[in-house]
Amino acid sequence: MPIALKPGSLKDPEIAALFRTEDPESYFADLREIGHGSFVGFGYSWPRMCSHQKDVIWWEAKWNDIVKEVKFLKNLRHENIVEFKACFLKDHTCWLVMEYCVGSASDILEVHKKPLREQEISAICQQVLHGLRYLHSLGRIHRDVKAGNILLTDSGVVKLADFGSASLVCPAQSFVGTPYWMAPEVILAMDEGRYNDRADVWSLGITCIELAEKKPPFFNMNAMSALYHIAQNDSPSLPVGSWSSDFHDFVDQCLIKDPALRFSTETCLLHPFISSARPASILFDLIQRTKLLVRDLDHFQYRKLRKLIVDDDLCAESASSRSDSYTSTQSLCGAMRSSITSVSSLKKAQRSLVPIVPLADDSTTSPLSRTPPLSGSVDTDTDTDVTPPRPSLTPTAKTASMEMNHEQQQQQQHQHQQQEQQQQLSIVGPRRRKEEILAWRRSRFATIRPTVTIAREQTEYAAENNMHEQMSGYKRMRREHQKELKQLEEKFNSEMDNLKMKLDREYENLLLQFHKEMDKLHVTHRQELDKRLKTNEELERKLRKAIVQQQEVEMKALQMQLKKEYKVNKERLKQELKMENSSKSFVEGNLKTSKQNHLHVQAEAENRLIADHKFYLDFEIRKLKRRRLLHYHQLEQDLIREELGVRGRQLQSAHTLLRRHHELTRDLEMRQLNSLQNLRCQHLQKQHASELQNQQAYMKRVQDELRKKHAMQVKQQPKELKQKELQIRRQFRQAVKTQTRQYKLLQLQLTQDLPKDEQREVVARLKDEQKRKLALLAEQYEGSIGEMMEKQTVQLETWQEEEARQTKDKLNEELELLMAFQSKQRMQMDQHHEREKGRLNEKVSLRLAVLENKMDDEVTQFERERQDRLNQLQTRQNQELDVFDQASIHLGFSLIALSASSSSTSTASGSSSSATAVANKPGVINSASIQDAIHQQPTTDNSFQAVTAHHHHQHLSSSSSSNNNNNNNNNSRNNNNSNNNNSNNNNNQCISPSLHPSASSGKQRYELLEEDYRKKWAIS
């Protein structure tokens, strides 16, 4: 027997067919890392055999998750779903090749720093709904719809990405998705059951709010707190503003908390907000505007860096400029370094398309671009776009002013770069120049994100990885809890199935035992009936033999008696003739006549005796058969009562077993429910502990960041104070210069017409006045410096204290909300457990009531069947006895005599002397010995001894009494009367008073019977 392969084993041909074993680096050139998700790395490269960009993603996730993801992606083919190209397996790393998109909807929000227009949101939602409708038609759920997972191509086609959280089945029950976009039924899936594809519609509604407000609802809260708000509070809505009523209605319909009332993808596509007319190129224009803005931002950063490098000496005049230049140079140099290795347009967290560990965790997407298959050879270049006119929008007014101030410098730098490139190209050969040109063109792929954003993303990735890991750990814990509950339920189902099988087997064995017992009882009864039949035949044979022997003796005695009488008569006749002296011939003639007469009389006597013997033999045999028939009927009644009693005990035993089975099942169900509820409570405690731990970690992180921010502000305060001091100093210097100029002019005016002696005095007086005013100005300067420093210090401290207080209040409020929700969740779980116990008790009570009704029905049916069988037996026996009596009457026997002799079986010992006396009479056969043998057979009372269940004894006794009354009313079937015991002179037959009402005593009954016998059997 072949060994079963483990799930996901590469030895499985179906799994091996998903991966290519070639080296991916042999297929792709210029491979470089362009981004990171929480669990996956992203790279950008060019295929060596074609001129199209590819997005390469390398995995280090769990193998089963990778297999699931590749299977999911490989079977998807839709215009609005990111296209799967190939998957390579190299060492312990998976390389997934997907089509490349220029960015995501969240990237557009980040670049423009403002919400999208309503028509742009409508166009994006329409294509997203087409992709979701395709997924839902396959019975799958995306479960992570958000702006970061909605990618766009150069041509403005919307692509759904990030299927790491997707579900292969619908409905699902996993806790999967990004917290702020998760539907309430997904959050409560482990507590309240399953959810379906309407969860994607909720996420789409949240995405609409995100595109309209730049952030989803509750985004300023901790992820845990956001989950509780979504699950417990009312649905969020689109803020009142410049949005249309159709947009408001569409969002409200998508965010209905009841999934049954929420729109489906088909209904959403028919909504006026989606189906309204709009320009066909609206998304293409959005992409082009975004690309131009990104290009301007990159150029501005480049010019800014260039300015800082070229104008370093000019910037060194003031401490403020030096500080700004130092800070800007540090940040921009870091951006330049990161742009060398990761000049990409991927969005913030590129892990949703193919997440690593686990695939179903929170993730975002990688912006991938639409490209032909790996074997394609279409020659296009993403950097050869037709550049549209320069957009009118700029990031800030400061950006525009900086561009105007440094436009000339930019032109000079651009010319300088062109000259350097031309010099380099002129040195190398044509082939080298071609490779350089291709490498330079390939390095500039289409993007809608600035280089600074990519650099900042890589910096923030390391800082935010702890939060991602925390959320991932929480989701992993929820999935483990769900897995444990599922395993426990499967274990309970297996235990219940095993118990049912055991109980069914025990019940079947009991029924089989009952069946064998009844078969054995039937065999025993059949043997007893057969034995009784054989006994009856033996008794009939013995009786027939005894009567025949006695009749032979009587026949011989008759013949001897006749012979003696003939001899006596012959001698008497001879004497008479001899006395009369008759002649010899006369004597001989008389003797001959006498002999003939004697022979004639003898023949008549013998014939009469033979006829009487035959009638008597038939009568006795008939009496015996009737008596044995009544005994046989009594035996049948005893046996059927015994059978019914056994069946009643069996039925009672079966019912006892069923009640015990019910108790065992009830105990197991109660024990399983208690175990399940205890496990849920443990999971809830762990979940709450984890949530509190995460919330406390979040609060500590926020407070630490706030302290760092305040420390940085305190650290930077001397620089700011120095800058303001320098500004005041400039103002002081300017005031001193102005005052000096004023005094010079005043001195010139005053000394023009004065002689030199007076001029000296005026000049001295003016100098003293100038010194006095300069002293006052210096004092004012020092006071301004002190006031400024004091004001700035107090303002900073007050602002920091207020910010710390507000942050602390906010965090405490979130913690209180979390604890309140946890308390509510515990209360809801307790209520749910009580409802489960109540439902189980109702189920057990209903099952017991059904079982009791079934057992009552079985008992009622058994009693009905028992009564029917007894009635049928009684009817059959009565019919058999009627047939026997009719046959007896037809044969000429007296029914009274047969009934009397049949009912006198209990008085055989008291009538033996009478039988002897009757046997000595002429023509009456003495069969006392045979009668004694017959009468010695055991007789039983005709009253029914019913063996039934304990609660039916009275009913069965009354039924038996009614049967006895019916039997007593039937002629030739009555029991002996107590007066029969007083008759001692019967001829082995006792006539019942009911058959002979005129007979008042045993003597009269005997005389009537003897007279009847004499009439028939007297010998003349």
Image (cartoon, rainbow, N blue to C red):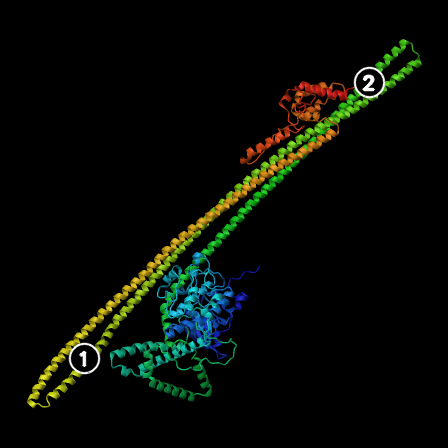
- Which residue is the site of mark 2? 562
601 lies above or below 737 = above
Tag shown at residue 732: 1
Frontmost residue, 474 versus 206: 206
On the question of residue 353 being in view, the answer is: no
The structure residue drawn at horizontal position 74% and vertical position 30%, both measured from the top left corner, is 890
Q: Earlier in the sequence, mark 2 or mark 1?
A: 2
Report how far apart the C-alphas of labels 2 and 1 lie in the structure: 189 Å
861 lies above or below 368 = above
Q: Quadrant of the N terminus?
A: bottom right
On the question of residue 223 being in view, the answer is: yes
Residue 885 is situated, as x and y percent measured from the top left of the image, at 71, 30
Q: Nearer the viewer, mark 2 or mark 1?
A: 1
Frontmost residue, 532 versus 786: 786
**Viewed as shown, does residue 115 lie left or right of 540?**
left
On the image, which quarter does residue 639 sit in? top right
Q: Identify the amino acid type marked 2.
A: Leu
Residue 229 is situated, as x and y percent measured from the top left of the image, at 37, 61
- Residue located farthest toward the front when viewing the structure as drawn: 245
- Residue located farthest toward the left when viewing the structure as drawn: 757
Q: Identify the amino acid type marked 1.
A: Phe
Which class describes the residues within 10 Å of circle 1: few (<14), some (14-19), or many (20+)?
some
Which class describes the residues within 10 Å of circle 2: few (<14), some (14-19), or many (20+)?
some
Tag shown at residue 314: none
